[in-house]
Amino acid sequence: MPKNPFACAECHLILTDGKDQCDRCPSAQVSSDWQGYVVILKPGRSEIAQRLQVDRPGTYALKVNVR
Ligand SMILES: [Zn+2]
């Protein structure tokens, strides 16, 4: 089974393979322990996007666990 990619604990963005730092929030923690894979195409129209405070399209994790 392939290893989970990292997700940003700040903006919930799922990072592309091999990346361990979010472009948007370089100081934020990242974690490979996350749940719920959501693809957000139109943040303005998506309830989930509003809940996660996502303002641009992308692939996000619903929940990111950091230690
Ligand atoms: Zn981020």
Image: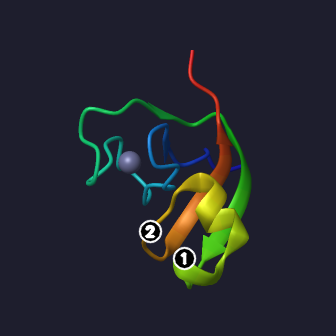
Residue 66 horizontal/vertical position (percent)? 57, 23
Residue at the spot x=63%, y=83% of the render? 45
Separation of marks 1 and 2 at Cα, in angstroms = 6 Å
Q: Which residue is denoted by mark 1 in the rendering?
A: 43
Q: Is residue 67 left or right of residue 36?
A: left
Residue at the spot x=44%, y=68% of the render? 55
Question: Residue farthest to the top?
Answer: 67
Residue 43 horizontal/vertical position (percent)? 54, 76
Whether pointer 1 and pointer 2 mark residues with C-beta atoms closer than 8 Å, the reply is yes
Instruction: Classify 16 as above or below 18.
Output: below
Helix, strand or loop status at disc 1: helix
Q: Residues within 10 Å of mark 2 (few under 14, many from 20)?
A: some
Residue at the spot x=59%, y=54% of the render? 52
Helix, strand or loop status at disc 2: loop
Q: Residue 55 carries which label?
A: 2
Image quadrant in which the C terminus is located = top right
